[in-house]
Image (spheres, grey):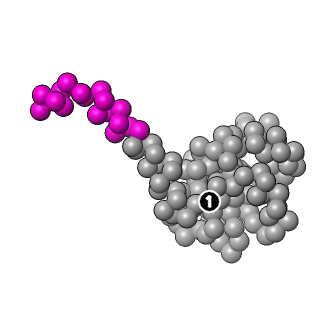
């Protein structure tokens, strides 16, 4: 017990980091979520798929990926039934964090394949992918 008291901050830090790695890396891989890069998207963008933008309304109005549907992360569980299950789903946000959470929710609900767009809208714009 003395060791735990002496090393409490280290234990808490390790626990937090392990939780972050589990939630952001290990669990999505176990659910089959794949990383989508702009280069991979270039090759599949003319194939049937659903692009879901999970950013806020204000972010959406400030510019979005062409052909994306808007379902804010907070609404993903309520509105996921509007996403077809018969084709791949690509989820995008501003940086890739919220889309990772949405992709996890979709994968747990039986959507497959599900892709998390790496780097979010910043990567999308840098790759000169179409925007509105």
- Tell which of 87 and 118 is nearer to you: 118
Principal secondary structure, stretch drawn in magenta: helix
Residue lying farthest bottom? Answer: 86
Image quadrant assignment for residue 55: top right
Residue denoted by label 1: 34
| Left or right, 44 with reference to 93 | right
Residue drawn at the location 51% of the way across and 50% of the way down: 25
Residue drawn at the location 31% of the way across and 29% of the way down: 10
Q: Is residue 50 magenta?
A: no
| Left or right, 120 with reference to 77 | right
Q: Which residues are magenta?
A: 1-17
Q: Kindly tell me whether residue 102 is visible in this rendering.
A: yes
Residue lying farthest top? Answer: 6
Q: Quadrant of the C terminus?
A: top right
Image quadrant assignment for residue 112: bottom right
Residue 99: image location, x then y, percent: 62, 49
Residue drawn at the location 85% of the way across and 65% of the way down: 46
Residue 101: image location, x then y, percent: 55, 50
Q: Quadrant of the N terminus?
A: top left
Residue 93 higher or lower than 27, as above or below: above
Residue 45: image location, x then y, percent: 82, 61
Q: Is residue 12 magenta?
A: yes
């Amino acid at each position: 017990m003395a060791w735990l008291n002496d090393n409490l901050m280290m234990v808490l830090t390790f626990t937090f980091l392990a939780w972050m790695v589990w939630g952001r890396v290990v669990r999505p891989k176990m659910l089959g979520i794949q990383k989508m890069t702009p280069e991979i998207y270039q090759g599949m963008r003319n194939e049937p798929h659903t692009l879901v933008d999970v950013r806020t309304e204000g972010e959406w109005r400030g510019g979005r990926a062409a052909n994306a549907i808007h379902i804010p992360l907070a609404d993903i569980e309520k509105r996921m039934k509007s996403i077809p299950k018969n084709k791949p789903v690509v989820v995008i946000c501003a940086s890739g964090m919220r889309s990772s959470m949405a992709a996890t929710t979709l994968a747990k609900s039986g959507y497959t394949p599900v892709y998390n767009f790496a780097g979010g809208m910043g990567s999308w714009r840098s790759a000169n992918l179409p925007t509105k």
